[in-house]
Image (cartoon, grey):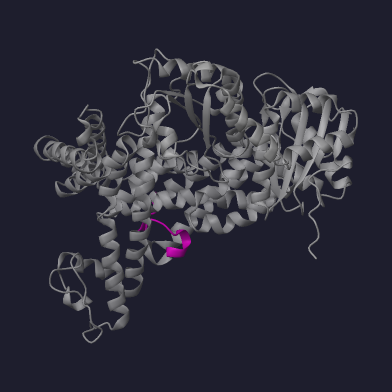
Amino acid sequence: MTQPSPPVTTPDLVLLGVDAGADKEAVIARLAAQAAAAGRCDDPKGLAGAAAEREAKSATGLPGGIAIPHCRSPYVDVPTITFARLDPKVDFGAPDGPADLVFLIAAPDSGGAEHLKLLSSLARSLVRPDFVTSLREAATADDVVALIDSAVHPKPKPAAKPAETAQAAQAEIATPAEAKPAAVKPKRIVAITACPTGIAHTYMAADSLKLAAERAGVDFVVETQGSSGSTPIPPDVIASADAVIFATEVGVKDRGRFAGLPVIASGVKRAINEPDVMIAEAVAASDNPNAARVEGGGAAAASSSATQGSSDVGWGTRTRQILLTGVSYMIPFVAGGGLLIALGFLFAGYDIANAADGQSAQAYGMNSLGAHIAVTNTLTDLPAGGLMQYIGAVLFTVGQLSFMFLVPALAGYIAFAMADRPGIAPGFTAGAVAVFVGAGFIGGIVGGVIAGFVAKSIGRLEVPRWLRGLMPVVIIPLGASLVVGLTMFLLLGRPLAALTNALTEWLSGMSGSSVLILGVILGLMMCFDLGGPVNKAAYAFAAAGLSTTDVASMRIMAAVMAAGMVPPLAMALATAVRPKLFSEPERENGRAAWLLGASFISEGAIPFAAADPLRVIPSMMAGGAVTGALIMAFDVTSKAPHGGIFVFFAIGNLAWFIVALTAGTVVGAVAVIAAKQFLGKKSAEDAAAPVAA
């Protein structure tokens, strides 16, 4: 017989009227110690460190004097909630002041679903004033346990009794229609809530808006786009809606469903802090013909100065989102194609590249049309080098074909970010034209922006109802492709090609101190935000140039890849050399970072940077700058765009590559150790030490 799961909280996990310390780190440590004393945790310092690391990424303080620090941890075996009612209050970063009600929510590493369920269930109850008041007035720990249990495991509402249903039906029948007052149809508002983590704020915003809608007598339906999935609002509900609210910190999934609806858009926290105001704004927008509306073919709602809170996304942020969308969709083509090319070199040698222009095509198992057309399709006609050379030819050709989509994918998904799906076809067309005229990477960006702008503009046109169904699949792609094609061929093709050629020649001609400066700049960019926009911009620049097989481009690729390997390797080295400066979760991340760094996955250093950005990021940038400069100084090249040390066969001057990488790793590790040692913060173990009640 299956044993029942232990309750998420018990009386010995509840602290009432406790002074847990002067700051949130001390409170978290105190609650972790309480969990250990109750037998729920086998390492309170490790649990406190994991919760503090999560807290450093974004504050968990909520309006109303509440805080919900939370984490997944290997130091707990079952989902656990430890609660403290503090006296005095402690600041957890809420906008309205310090918190006196603190929940430490811990779930085992394998309990992601339980973690999300606990958080979302508890968060929904915390928006109810009666629940929060009951917590403050609870006289005993048992009372608190009962309240939390009712929040985490709400009981289903009982179904109406048949007699009651019959009585209601009879009353309805007995009331003459003419005696009923004329009903006023309430406004129907739909909403989307979503936060970056998709846990607490997503659901709190949803319930805050729901309660506000009930107070205002508004028919309200919300879709929570959280980490545990979402149930889309039915199309018929959207069709009958009067306005939509987007309370999100991230992009809205399938935004086009709400095309034409008046929109109130803001960050998710505004929906928690001002739900009544947002509902009132949505009701007002539904009656305002000049209100901002979700655009018919686009990915963003128009902003309106007349409607407060209609948009909190500036043009700078929006531009970054557009370009990053293109780069993000382009990178799989780069990584996949580049690694296939590198494998082709491994199997067939570097001379396989000569077959790409038709030279010696037959010798490498390819027909006379060259590597871009086809390869020999029978194993009975192998080249002189045998099966390995033939496989190398195949791998190289597939990689080259994948690389052909690099610029079209970049342009296509830039246009997609601007105009949604109708922008994809004209965007890919713009990218293909950019490749055809020699405009390359720069031409892809420009063409994608033009394609997205034109597609979005055409989508705004007022057309008859019978023509609307053809707009996204025929009219918009046709019109936008025509405009961007003519523009690229007749106006921008030659200037952009000249600019691209000039840039290539400048890079090829760099020598001496100038090439060292370029290496330093690329190293700084790769380590600045560890997978963010600046990192991706440097990587995209290097990867796009790699398709030309120019030596200067291969040096840039080597500098970018080596510098991107430095942060995780440097943090791994630092945690191994001075483990007492790091929490137990950071030490575990450090052990994993060795492999991540060796594989060129810069994101392996993100947990460290998120917990301590002011000391980690500058240290990593110092290491990256050293590595970038040394790569350039020693003429190291890379024919592969990804893979780190595992594509050693595609790296020229491999020994100097390892020297440059080692030097940058040591510099980064020494810098971060010195920063943590001397820049005024206690060690992780001291910070996590329990504070007496």
Side (left or right) of 375 relative to 614: left
Residue most toward the bottom? 380
Seen in the picture, residue 447 relative to 214 is either above or below; the reply is below
Tell me the quarter of the picture where residue 398 sits: bottom left
If the image is split into quadrants, where does the C terminus sit? top right
Seen in the picture, residue 533 relative to 187 is either above or below; the reply is below
Residue most toward the left? 490
- Whole-percent x, y for residue 686 in the image: 79, 39
Residue most toward the top? 306
In the foreground, 621 or 262: 262
Examine the structure image and report whether residue 599 is included in the region drawn in magenta. Answer: no
Examine the structure image and report whether residue 638 is included in the region drawn in magenta. Answer: yes
In the foreground, 397 or 90: 90
Seen in the picture, residue 500 relative to 656 is either above or below; the reply is above
Side (left or right) of 671 relative to 72: left
Measuring 37% from the left and 30% from the top, which residue is drawn there? 300
Q: Which residues make up the magenta segment?
A: 633-647
Q: Is residue 175 visible in the rendered structure shown here?
A: yes
If the image is split into quadrants, where does the N terminus sit? bottom right
